[in-house]
Amino acid sequence: MEAVTVTILRYLLVALLAVAAVFADYSTSLKPGKAELKSAGALAFGPEGILFIGDSMGAAVFALDTGDRKVRSSGPVEIKALNEKVAALLGTSPDQILINDVAVNPLSKRVYLSVSRGRGPDAAPMLLRTDASGKLEEVSLDKVKHARVGLPNAPDAAAKDRRGESLRLEAITDLAYVDGRVFIAGLSNEEFASKLRAVPFPFQEANQGTSVEIFHGAHGRFETNAPVRTFVPYAIQKEQHILAAYTCTPLVKFPVSQLKPGAKVMGTTIAELGNRNRPLDMIVYRKGGSDYILMNNTSRGVMKMSTAKIHEYEGITKQTDITGLPYETLAELKGVEQLDRLDDLNVLMLVRSEGGGLDLKTIALP
C-alpha cells in the first residue's frame, strides 16, 4: 500500500510540474510593454486568463496576460444602457462608440469588451471589463505582458469590396483557442480569399492559412471569397471540427485535421438557415445530457439547434431554401448582438433595446 501511495504521489508531482512548465511557457512568451493595437475586434480566452484580440486593421492577433485569474464578483451580470456607461467612461457620446465583441473570462467570470472610440479608420481601440458588481473599467494597453503575431496575407489596407467597404476590416472575423492553437477566421488577399488559420500558441509566426470553399445553397453556387462570420470548435463523433456560419446563412463543418497551411478545403454545408440574414455570434453548450448550438442573427433572431444528429447530414449540393440541421427560433430573445457563456448554466447577452440602447443581460441557457 505504501509503494502504491508513493507511485501515485510521483504521478501527481509529474502532472503538476507539467502544468507549471506549460504556464511558464505561456508567461515567458509574453513581454511587458505597450500593446499597439490599430483596432480591437474579435475576442477569445485561452489558458490562464490570456485574452486573444483580433486586430484587423493591424492584420495581427494579440495575446494579453490579463492577470485576471480569481473570481471577484460572482452572479448574473445585469447592466442597462451599457453604451452610455462606456461613452461616459471614455469621455465621449454614445454615438461615438462601438462595442465590437464581448467575452467572459472563464476563470474570473469578468466580462471583457472590445470597443472602438470614434468612427471610421481613426477610431481608437479600447479594452474594457466589468463583472456582476456592474463596475466598468478600462484595461490599460500601455504596460501589459503581451505577444503579437502578424497575418502575412491580409487584404490591403486600401482594398474595398463591391459595396465600397474596407476588406481589411474582415481580415479577422472570429477567433477561438483550442488545444494549444488559436483558430482565426477571415479574409486574405489571395484569389481564394476566405481563410481559416490555426496558429500555435505561444506565438511564433502565422502561416498563410487554409483556403476554405463552401457550397452556398441559398445562392446555388460555390463560394471562396465569403468570410466565415462566426464559428465554434466542436467534436463530431470524436473528431474535432470547426462549425462555421456565413452570411445568408449556411452552416458548414470543416474537419480540423484538413486545415493545413496552403491547402484548399471544401466544407460540408449541413444547413441553410435562411437568406437575407447575417449570423453574429455562436456558442455550444450542454444541457440535460445533450449538446446545443445557440446562434444570434441580424434578421432571424436567436436560433437553437440540437447537435444530436449533426453527423448524419452529408452536405447540401444544390440550390435550396431552408433545409438541413433544423432550428428553433427563440422568439422571446430579440435584439441580441453578442453572446458568450457565463458559466455552465447561464449565457451572457449584449442586447439592443427598443430605444436603441445596449444592455448586458444574463439568462439561463435555454
Image (cartoon, rainbow, N blue to C red):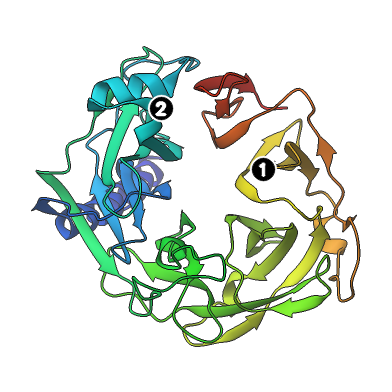
Query: Residue 79: where, in percent of width, then height?
Result: 45, 15
Query: Residue 259: where, in percent of width, then height?
Result: 55, 77
What residue do we see at 42% from left, 61% from top?
169
Helix, strand or loop at disc 1? loop
Quarter of the figure with the N terminus: top left
Amino acid found under the numbered disc labelled 1: Thr
Amino acid found under the numbered disc labelled 2: Lys
Task: Mark 2 vs mark 1: give the one in front.
Answer: 1
Reading the chain from its start, which is encountered first: label 2 or label 1? 2
- Residue 199 versus residue 92: which sits nearer the camera? 92
Could you tell whether 233 is left or right of 294 in the image?
A: left
> What is the crowding at mark 2: few (fewer than 14 residues within 10 Å), some, or many (at least 20)?
many
Q: Residue furthest front?
A: 164
Visible residue check, residue 27:
yes
Could you tell whether 344 is left or right of 116 in the image?
A: right
- Looking at the rendering, which quadrant does residue 264 occupy? bottom right
What residue do we see at 64% from left, 30% from top?
335
Q: Residue furthest top?
A: 133
Visible residue check, residue 12:
no
From the viewer's perspective, is residue 233 above or below residue 217? above
Quarter of the figure with the C terminus: top right
Query: Residue 276: where, in percent of width, then height?
Result: 75, 53
Could you tell whether 236 is left or right of 170 in the image?
A: right
> What is the crowding at mark 1: few (fewer than 14 residues within 10 Å), some, or many (at least 20)?
some
What residue do we see at 17% from left, 37% from top?
140
Which mark is on residue 298? Answer: 1
From the viewer's perspective, is residue 121 above or below residue 5? below
- Residue 184 versus residue 203: which sits nearer the camera? 184
For label 2, the residue is: 109
- Looking at the rendering, which quadrant does residue 202 occupy? bottom left
Helix, strand or loop at disc 2? loop
Query: Residue 246: where, in percent of width, then height?
Result: 66, 60
